[in-house]
Image (cartoon, grey):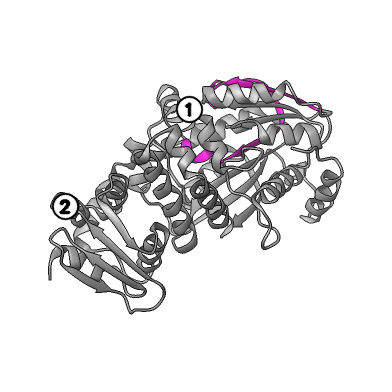
């Protein structure tokens, strides 16, 4: 048995996958259940790359057209792979590489202000038209909230914003800091539905430009302003702080500084909400493909890495909420929308970019569905009395916000 065959035999117990190596030799792995999928590797260098470093090489070879889907599709292939990793461990000869990546992750996640700006630009300053192809109307690039099965992406993203605003218990005139404000959608929601005075900060020039453009058309009761600014440079006092999908870019060695900044910026009776991708399975390195091609410097923390730092910061944890499969459903919507407009993406960029983006969305969806990824929300305060005593207030706040929401 070749090393190539052993690589897949070692991982796949269920499913129906036929692999063809660079010499044209085929073998089948799995128990034959489920829809069939067939993959072919075009050359010996690609095959060797997959044998030595499968979790990086599979993405790179697909991106370069050296791993061909002959039956089924990319998502089915990744679904078979990632659903089986929960059953069988990865090949032993790849463990050394995983240990090395775990040990060097602090270097990969070292994000001083200048490097953080470069990392943000690498992902968010690509053509905004790419994001318009697959995001909702409000350009929400974070996990949606599927409160009711079968709802569309626009509604699920609106429910996410409403849920977060309700938990924050915002009142008209509250000063709100949105750390990692993206294209401004959350800021406009909080200003429009809650009447807040929102300051949004981002490290992406493209996001800042669009947020300011949208600001010219905003007519809600509150106000917004946007700045190109690192959270470590922000000054002032805020009644509420919200950060959605930004904590993943902070880097493990910068967590203490992040929570110190939250504490320094938060009013005495203030409330902060941190929404982040996290891990069920404890600390681990970032996926090699995602780190190299999609989110340089990114990290998906385990709560065991975060909670001691919250405690030592002097902030009080008032609430923790875990969203399990919501991001899998969000990514499924994004992937379907991107694939429906893939030709437009190819005209904007090129075929290699489309393959990279397709792999990113498909692998991320499968990871949230079958691996140990989730989303957590932390509610932090300086004092215990900053929020009502029970979570019942959240439902009441949602009803109030629903009556005040502005159309997108």
Of 255 and 395, nearer the camera is 395
Of 313 and 189, nearer the camera is 189
Q: Is residue 288 left or right of residue 329?
A: left
Of 238 and 338, nearer the camera is 338
Q: What is the quadrant of residue 51 in the picture?
A: bottom left
Classify mark 2: helix, strand or loop. Answer: loop
Classify mark 1: helix, strand or loop. Answer: loop
Label 1 neighbour load within 10 Å: few <14, some 14-19, many 20+: some
The residue labelled by disc 2 is 43
Q: Is residue 44 left or right of residue 164?
A: left
Is 240 included in the stretch rendered in magenta? yes
User: In the rendered structure, which segment of residues is drawn in magenta?
Assistant: 222-249
Residue at 16% in and 52% down:
43
- Could one spot residue 269 in this view of the protein? no
Q: What is the quadrant of residue 122 in the picture?
A: top left
Q: Earlier in the sequence, mark 2 or mark 1?
A: 2
Residue at 55% in and 43% down:
134
- Could one spot residue 48 in this view of the protein? yes
| Relative vertical location of residue 163 with respect to residue 107 in this rendering, above or below | below
Observer-side mark, 2 or 1, equals 2
Where residue 217 appears, as percent x and y from the top left, is: 75, 24
Tag shown at residue 125: 1
Which of the image's four quarters has the C terminus? top right
Is 227 included in the stretch rendered in magenta? yes
Where residue 333 appears, as percent x and y from the top left, is: 57, 52
């Amino acid at each position: 048995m070749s090393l190539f065959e052993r690589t897949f035999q070692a991982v796949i117990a269920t499913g129906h996958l036929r692999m063809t190596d660079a010499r044209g030799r085929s073998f089948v792995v799995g128990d034959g259940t489920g829809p069939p999928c067939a993959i072919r590797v075009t050359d010996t260098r690609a095959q060797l790359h997959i044998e030595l470093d499968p979790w990086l090489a599979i993405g790179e070879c697909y991106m370069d057209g050296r791993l061909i889907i002959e039956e089924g599709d990319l998502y089915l292939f990744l679904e078979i792979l990632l659903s089986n990793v929960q059953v069988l461990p990865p090949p032993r000869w790849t463990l050394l590489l995983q240990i090395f990546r775990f040990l060097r992750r602090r270097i990969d996640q070292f994000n001083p202000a200048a490097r953080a700006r470069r990392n943000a630009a690498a992902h968010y300053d690509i053509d905004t038209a790419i994001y318009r192809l697959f995001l909702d109307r409000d350009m929400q690039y974070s996990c949606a909230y599927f409160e009711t099965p079968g709802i569309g992406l626009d509604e699920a993203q609106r429910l996410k914003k409403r849920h977060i605003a309700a938990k924050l218990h915002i009142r008209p005139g509250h000063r709100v800091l949105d750390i990692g404000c993206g294209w401004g959608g959350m800021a406009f929601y909080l200003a429009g539905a809650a009447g807040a005075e929102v300051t949004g900060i981002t490290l992406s020039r493209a996001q800042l430009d669009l947020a300011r453009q949208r600001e010219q058309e905003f007519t809600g009761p509150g106000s917004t302003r946007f700045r190109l600014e690192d959270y470590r440079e922000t000054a002032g006092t805020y009644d509420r702080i919200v950060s959605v999908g930004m904590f993943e870019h902070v880097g493990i060695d910068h967590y203490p500084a992040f929570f110190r900044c939250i504490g320094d910026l938060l009013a005495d009776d203030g409330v902060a909400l941190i929404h982040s991708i996290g891990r069920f399975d404890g600390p681990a390195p970032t996926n090699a493909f995602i780190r190299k091609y999609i989110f340089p410097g990114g990290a998906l923390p385990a709560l065991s890495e975060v909670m001691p730092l919250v405690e030592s910061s002097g902030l009080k944890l008032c609430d923790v909420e875990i969203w399990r499969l919501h991001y899998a459903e969000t990514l499924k919507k994004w992937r379907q929308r991107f694939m429906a407009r893939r030709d437009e993406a190819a005209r904007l960029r090129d075929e290699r970019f489309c393959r990279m983006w397709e792999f990113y969305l498909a692998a991320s969806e499968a990871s949230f569905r079958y691996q140990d990824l989730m989303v957590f929300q932390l509610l932090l305060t300086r004092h215990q009395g900053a929020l009502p005593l029970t979570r019942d207030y959240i439902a009441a706040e949602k009803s109030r916000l629903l009556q005040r929401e502005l159309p997108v």
